[in-house]
Amino acid sequence: MKALTITLIVIIAVLLVAFVVLYFLGRKAEKKQAEQQKTLEANAQTVNLLVIDKKKLKLKEAGLPSIVVEQTPKYMRRAKLPIVKVKAGPKVMNLICDGKIFDQILPKQEIKATVSGIYITNFKRIRGPVYEPPKKKGLFGKKKK
């Protein structure tokens, strides 16, 4: 019985230490994210864009500047990012889009976007197709054939 209680106490202690470490790492990450959000808002510009195409691509396949690829952490280089190919005036360029608004942007749509560097943070539709969110299905909402 003694061995069982000792192992349970050790397991509980390890879990407690893990939760404390995760708590402090989470707080640190929240502060860092809030700071980055402030810099994004400070550098934001409103631009008229024509959306040509949108895809989720790996960083190397996206056609972004080499400086961007070099500055990203190695674990993020393989992750797929929401990339939007846009025309701003006479220039065609690839921009990274916020994941929250990526589904709402449609190709062949003219938008007024809030751009911070190469990152689209927000947009308003000017012309083009209207986004219709997919209808939610119920619990047993599968289509019958």
Image (cartoon, rainbow, N blue to C red):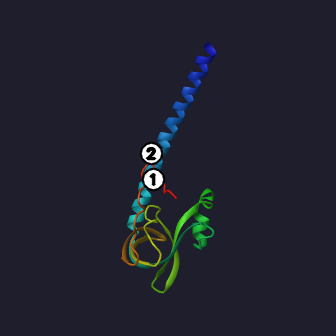
The image shows residue 62 at horizontal and vertical percentages of: 59, 71
- Mark 2: which secondary structure? helix
Label 2 crowd bin: few (<14), some (14–19), many (20+), radius 10 Å: few
Asked if 15 appears above or below 67 in the picture, the reply is: above
Looking at the image, the residue that sits furthest to the bottom is 90
Using residue 80 as the reference point, say whether residue 97 is left or right of it. Answer: left
Corner quadrant of residue 134: bottom left
Residue marked by disc 2: 27
Q: Nearer the viewer, mark 1 or mark 2?
A: 1
The image shows residue 25 at horizontal and vertical percentages of: 50, 44
The image shows residue 55 at horizontal and vertical percentages of: 54, 69
Q: Quick one: label 1 or label 2, which is nearer the N terminus?
A: 2
Q: Quadrant of the N terminus?
A: top right
Q: Amino acid at mark 1?
A: Gly
Residue marked by disc 1: 141
Give the residue drawn at x 45%, y 55%.
33
Asked if 45 appears above or below 140 in the picture, the reply is: below
In three-dimensional space, the C-alpha distance between marks 1 and 2, rounded to whole angstroms, equals 40 Å
Using residue 117 as the reference point, say whether residue 41 is left or right of it. Answer: left
Asked if 74 appears above or below 130 in the picture, the reply is: above
Looking at the image, the residue that sits furthest to the front is 145
Q: Are marks 1 and 2 in contact (CB under 8 Å)?
A: no
Q: Amino acid at mark 2?
A: Arg
- Mark 1: which secondary structure? loop
Asked if 9 appears above or below 51 in the picture, the reply is: above
